[in-house]
Image: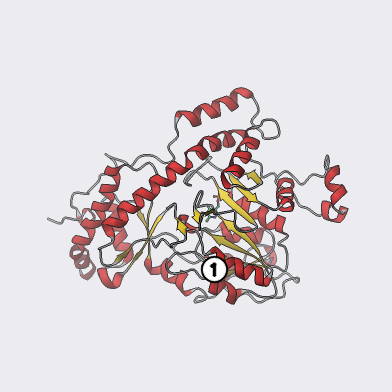
Amino acid sequence: MPKLALLGGEPVRRLDERPYPKYPSIGNEEIEAVIEVMRSGNLSSLRGHKVKEFEEAFAKYHGVPYAIAVSSGTTALHLALAAIGVGPGDEVIVPAYTFTSTATSVLMQCAIPVFADIDSRTFTIDPEDVERKVTEHTRAIIVVHLFGCPADMDRIKRIAEEYDIAIVEDCAQAHGAMYKGKKVGTIGDAGCFSFYQSKNMMTGEGGMIITRDPDIAERVSMLRNHAEIRGLKDYLKRHSPQEAFNMLGYNYRMTELQAAIGLVQLRKLDRMNEARRRIASEITKAIREIAGLEEPYVPDYAYHVFHIYAMKYYEEELGVPRDLFIDALRAEGVPASPGYEEPLYANPLYRLRLARKLGCPFTCPYYKGRVTYEDGICPVAEEICYRRGLWLLIHSELSDDDVKDIVEGIRKVVENIDELKRIRQG
Ligand SMILES: Cc1ncc(COP(=O)(O)O)c(C=O)c1O
């Protein structure tokens, strides 16, 4: 009788009988905050005051003067690049291993994403490769604090200063994470957050841009609300009409309902991050000794907030392909995933330069550089995508018993790996 659930054995946890707790956990506070807004009748930020309150609280939490709420993490990135002045002819260096919109936000500004490799331990952008990829066309770097682990910001800052390049921090997975005691998002020129419902704090959908730069803050505020100059006489006093009217604005506003949820979630953020860290440390203790699995690396400089528990998998040690191992974990009830399955440049959008009609921005006559999206440009990202990445989808609401089951599921698959090897041979 096989032991492994994948082969017909009894699973460690039957998810149909005992599902994991739901995430996000929506408490009475969030519900009442939304009802209050509904009763007020003001659902738009143009009428109510919740978005403003949320912005003030978020800025205060980060110790920065400006926070501007928007409709998503993607629109936050888009507006940060627009406000910095990224446009046709510019290159923006982005990591090859991240969520799609870190790079599509660059295309939205008709600029060219140039992919840099990642550090094999932290999975964040590799400063050495960033420096190799800088050209005379580089206008900005987007650094992603992936999975809640801050990137190596001192080294990135040094490069940015040397070549006069702006830094945008993509903090979509890292609310409250810290680099050398500084909150992520406060180190570069602008920090961008997502409040999609799986994030460390959430508003269903939503985003935020934080900055210390009053010009960036002003431009972002205008761009998210159609960049209408009407009522902005003051702006015209300080800027040329060329500058003032040369702005393509959007409606990227956050609603009052989202902001009301965000205010509650922000109050819970530190506690939720601490819970994620505790869970991660329990899992790490349990799997540290398992040959073939490598726990997430936490650099000395980091306060890691474990949006995802990202491990490395070694087929050479365990003797079965990663996907089979993951199938076996899932059958036991372990929330496992291979994660990002290819580096972003493998997407036909880049590889075939299909982004828009007529290949814009790759065919743009203002673009004088030569970007490449071939296999091999970011070997570490490729290795993590194709062979090594193994994510556990953890969150703050998991109980000690849930974590025990996750660990037991992993141990059980490792202890019975010969059963998997046999089906491979069979
Ligand atoms: C690293 C990263 N950047 C950007 C985003 C985009 O955020 P949103 O889904 O709110 O547009 C996400 C969200 O999944 C993300 O993980």
Q: Position of residue 249 (x, y in %)?
A: 74, 49
| Left or right: residue 353 compared with residue 1 | right
Quarter of the image with the N terminus is bottom left
Q: Nearest the camera: 315 or 135?
A: 135
How far from the left and from the top, in percent, is residue 97?
A: 49, 64
**Total number of numbered labels?**
1
86 left or right of 149 in image: right
Rendered residue at 59%/36% (across/down) = 259
At 57% from the left edge and 33% from the top edge, which residue is drawn?
260
- The quadrant where residue 87 appears: bottom right
User: Vertically, is 255 above or below 147?
Assistant: above
Q: Quadrant of residue 107?
A: bottom right
Give the residue furthest to the left: 1
* Image quadrant containing the C terminus: bottom left
**Identity of the residue furthest to the top in this view:** 39
Crowding at dot 1, Cα within 10 Å, few <14 / some 14-19 / many 20+, comes out as: many
Residue 378 visible in the shown view: yes
Visible residue check, residue 395: no
Q: Is residue 336 above or below residue 389?
A: above
Residue drawn at the location 83% of the way across and 55% of the way down? 243
Location of mark 1 (residue): 345
The amino acid type, in three-letter code, at marker 1 is: Tyr
Q: Is mark 1 within 8 Å of ligand 1?
A: no
The residue nearer to you, when weighing 83 against 44, is: 83
386 with respect to 236 (left or right): left
* Residue 54, position as x, y percentages in the image: 60, 38
In the figure, residue 258 lies in which quadrant? top right
At mark 1, the secondary structure is: helix
